[in-house]
Structure formats: C-alpha cells, structure tokens
Amino acid sequence: MNETVTFFSGFKINDLFFLGEAALQTLMIAAISISSGTLLGAICGWGLAEGKTVVRWTLNSILDVFRSVPLLIQLILFYNLFPIIGFDLGPFASGIIVLSMYTCALVASVVRGGIESVQQPMRRAARSLGMSYLQSMRHVIFPIGLRAVLPSWIGVALGVLKDSALVSVLGYVELLRASQILMTRTQEPFLILALAGAFYFALSYPLSRYSKQLEERWAS
Amino acid sequence: MDYNFHWRPVFNKLPDLLEAGLLTLEVSLLSMVIGTVLGLLLALAKLSPLKPARWFAITWIELARNTPALFQLFFFGFGLGAFGWHLSPFLIVLVGLSFNNAGYLAENFRGGFQAVPENQYRAARSLGMTAFQATTRIVIPQVFKIVYHPMTNQMVWAVLMSSLAMMVGYRELAGETQFLASKTFRIFEYFLAAAVIYYVIVKIILGLSRLLAWRLFRYE
C-alpha cells in the first residue's frame, strides 16, 4: 500500500452530477422566485398604474428600495433579519423571499408600463361598449399591454435567473457555489467555470434571442 | 424578540464605511468610463462589414449579457489564474465590471447609431465635413441623446454590481461592511448601514443625471 493522501483530486465524472444537481437548484430557485415575484409584481404594477396617489406613492417608494440597494446586500440583510424577528429561515427560503421581492419590484414597473401603454381612447371604447372595469382589464388592456412588455418581462426573468447566483453568499449550494467548491478541490478553475458559464449561457441566450425576435415582429 | 441591536459600533465605523463608499463610486465610475469606450468600439465593430470584427463583438456582447456578473468576476479572478494571470482584487472588479458594462452599453450604442438616419451623415458630408467631423459633430451628439438615459441606468447598475467585489475580496463598501461585520458579528446593523449608503449613492447619481439632462437637453 503506497497510496498517498492527496487533498486535491482531478475533475471526475461524479463531479458532473454534482454540478448538474446544483444547476437544478439554480433552476428551482429562479423558477419559484420568478413566478411568485411576477404574480406579486403584477398586483403592485396594477396598483402603480391605477391606484390612488397615496397607494402609488407608497408602493413606489417601497419598491424603489429594492431597486436601489444591491441584491447581495438585500440577501445578507434579510437572511440576518428573519431570525431576529423570530423566523428561523434557511438560506433557501430567505433567498427565495428576497429574490421574489426583487423580481416583484422589477416586474411592477414593467407591468405599469404595459398598462399605461394602452391609450385612454381604447379604454374608453372598451368601457363604452358596456364592459365592466375588470372585463376591460382582462379582454382589452391585458392582451394589448402584454404584447408591449413581454420582451422586457423576459429580460427581467433572465436577469433574476442570473442574479440567483448571488444566493450562494448565504451558503446555499447552487451552480456557482458548487463550481467554487469544485474549483477549490480540483484546482481546475478554468474548466469548471467554463461549464458553469456554458449552462447559464445555454439558458439565457436562446431566450434573449427569442425576446428580441418577438420585439421586432411586434414592432412592425 | 430577544435580540439587542447595537448601533454604537456602526456609528463608530461610519467614516470607514463612507470612505469605502467612495471606493465603490470610484471603481464603478472607472468601469463606466472604460465600458463606454469599449462599448462604443464594440458597437462600431458589430455594425462594421468586417466579419472577424463583427464576430468578436457579438461574442463579447452575448457573453457579457447572458452570464451572471458574479460568474464574470469569478472568471477574471480565478479562471485567468489557470493561465498564470493573477489580478489584484481591485483589478478583478474593474476588469469584470468594465467587461460587463461594455457588453450592455454596446447594445445601447448600436441602437443609438441605428436610430440616427443615414442621411444626417450624408448631409454633413455634402456640406463639406470630413468623415471624422461628420461622425463626431453630427452623429455622436444625436446618439448621445438617445443613449443618455440607458447610460444613467447602466451607471446605477454598475454601482449595484460593484457590491459583488465582496465575493472576490475587494474592500469597497460591501467588502468593507462584511469585514467590519465579521469582526463584531453585528451583521444586520452593518449591512443596514451599507444599504442606506447604497440607496443614497444611487439617488445622488439619479439626481445629478437629471440635473445634467436638464442642462444638456434644454434646447430640445
């Protein structure tokens, strides 16, 4: 037995599974935060566009904070705030809550833009045809506004997907954190980072291309 | 709630935090300047008929836009180490942010160049201006007006992104905050202070940009 103890070992096939699992975590965190953030953001955006001045002002100043403070700081801040106010949430739950709020703040301004992009005459026409407020929202403003802002919504969603990498600061093992762990062990930073980067790129690039096409098609 | 807030250590270290805030401003401003120059060149390269130049620009722009900024910092920090290039933490942040800014700004500039009608250039040339004069005196000022607001946004993003410096060991505002917080374990208090400083920095930038816009575009 002349086996020597080595601290660093090369990149193995197993590590690919480790990375793959971490990539799934990234996808999961992003998917949950984007969907809940979009729902919340739609409501907030509606409030921003149609609410009374007080509502608009309050919502705007709250959401503005999430847009003006770095996400990294928000994550650490809330991760440390939750235990203080009595909720001992792990990195996963804290990460999702913060990312959802962040998404909500970004989506809200997108949704407001969408609602405001539908001109007043169109809305009056819908109402004068006998539609109720909710009906005009659902059948007129929603479909027209959606066209105007779907590309920017995709942009926001991709941004959140990429920003979900920051949850690693809380110690949650998502893709970038996993690659950091592997880099420390295998001492092969270039290969591993290239793999992680390729994953993000493969997700983000086709979607951003698609959104650009949508934009061009709908603009004409 | 059995947590006692201790604000005293934060107040005592406030000068350090503010000084670190200046570093944040410095690194993000520098990265904006470099990013603007590179972004202009990339935009011109993407519009040029030369195929290699176009491909180079497209690769840069798409990589910068479709991977997380944190990944880019890691790449310039650890990935380049594989080739024996070891950058200092400041350089990692500066190079990473400039790379990212250049990618995003290039797309804005390209949009700006395409929005200025070709005839403006032709008219300038037919009035006897040289190609250089026509570009710098007729085309660029109009492009600048179009990209002014996106550039302001990018500046805000640069400030927010610079907080990622914490993850590569550069002690600007976020890094300094983490350093101080880990010495005293007053994590929440310190990061709340940092969040407030970031918020103020962002508001100052937006305010200045609005003032500047009022001064620059008052004859429009």
Image (spheres, rainbow, N blue to C red):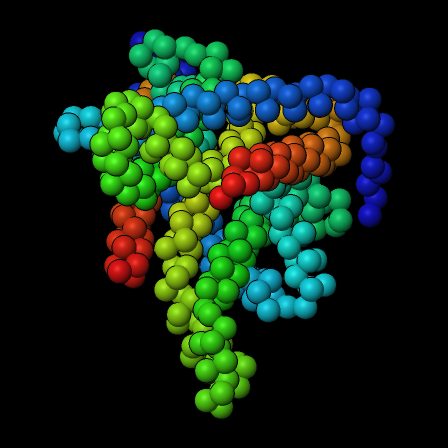
Residue plotted at (55% across, 62% down): A45
Residue extending furthest toward the front: B127
The x, y position of residue A106, in whole percent, is 52, 51
Front-lying residue, A215 or B191: A215
The x, y position of residue A211, in whole percent, is 31, 53
Q: Is B6 positioned to the left or the right of B125 in the image?
A: right
Residue plotted at (68% across, 35% down): B200
Q: Is A174 positioned to the left or the right of B192 in the image?
A: left
Query: Quick check: B101 above or below A137?
Result: above
Q: Quadrant of the C terminus of chain A?
A: bottom left
Residue plotted at (40% across, 65% down): A146
Residue plotted at (57% across, 65% down): A49
Q: Count numbered badges in the picture.
A: 0
The x, y position of residue A174, in whole percent, is 44, 39
Q: Let me know if residue B200 appears in the view.
A: yes
Query: Quick check: A59 above or below A26?
Result: below
Query: Quick check: B90 above or below B117?
Result: above
The x, y position of residue A6, in whole percent, is 38, 14
Q: Quadrant of the N terminus of chain A?
A: top left
Q: Let me know if residue A175 appears in the view.
A: no
